Every structure is written in C-alpha cells, then in structure tokens.
Image: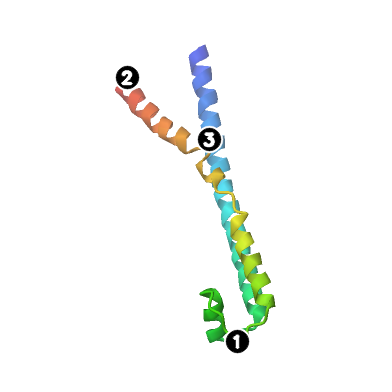
Amino acid sequence: MTKLEKIEQQEQKTREKIAEMQAMLKQIDGQRTEQENLQIIQQVRALKLSREELYAFIHGKSTPGIFSGAVDTAAEMETIYSRRDTKHNNIFDDNENNDESEDVSNEEN
C-alpha cells in the first residue's frame, strides 16, 4: 500500500466518522426540540387559560382575567428558543460541498 493509498484510506474513515457524528447530532437535536416542546406545553397548561385568553396571550393582547404570572411564563418560553445554538448545523456544510467537487474531479481522472 502506497503512502497515497494510506492517506486516502484515512480520509475515507474520517468522512465516515463525520457522517456518523452528523447523524447523532441530528438525533440529539430532535430530542432537544421534543423536550423544548414538552416544556412549552406544560407551561401553557399550567396557565389554565380559556381558549380566548390563550389566543389573546399568544397574540400579545391585553385581556382582563389573565394573571400577571403569565408574563413571566411567556418570558420563560422565549428563553427556551433564544438558547438554541444553530451553529452546529453548519459545521460540515462546507466540507460536504468540497466533497462533491472532489468526487467530480476524481471521476474525471
């Protein structure tokens, strides 16, 4: 096996590991989203609002009868989404684009 073949083999193994890690990251992201949604549902149910009150609350309308604790809960709901870090979704995007161009150039040779 030549040095070039060893490098290509190592490169292939690394690409496979990256693909596995991306799949794992996607699964973890889905689990996080599911848990965030469950927290939101629990918080909304804890408000015990009528449909009309919930509609007004979601649309930011002032409605008599909605207790002042709802504002804190809405802020809590917003912080759940503000904590999300979407940078990890783009980590390997550039590498995938480069991989495709390399595959095309390898096919030409």
Quadrant occupied by the C terminus: top left
Classify 69 as above or below 17.
Answer: below
Asked whether the beta carbons under mark 1 and mark 3 sit within 8 Å of each other, the answer is no
Q: Secondary structure at mark 3?
A: helix
The residue under label 2 is 109
Which of the two labelled residues, at mark 1 and mark 2, occupies the earlier sequence position?
A: 1
Bin the neighbour count of mark 2 within 10 Å (Cα to Cα): few under 14, some 14-19, many 20 and up: few
Q: Is residue 1 visible?
A: no
Q: Residue at x 52, y 45 (%)?
A: 89
Tag count in the figure? 3
Q: Position of residue 71 (x, y in %)?
A: 65, 73
Residue 65, placed above or below residue 41: below
At horizontal 60% and vertical 52% (from top left) the residue drawn is 28
Marks 1/3: CA–CA distance: 58 Å
Q: Which residue is mark 1?
A: 64
Q: Which residue in the protein does label 3 denote? A: 16
Q: Is residue 50 above or below residue 21?
A: below
Residue at 63% across, 60% down? 79
Q: Amino acid at mark 1?
A: Pro
Secondary element under disc 2, as helix, strand or loop, is: loop
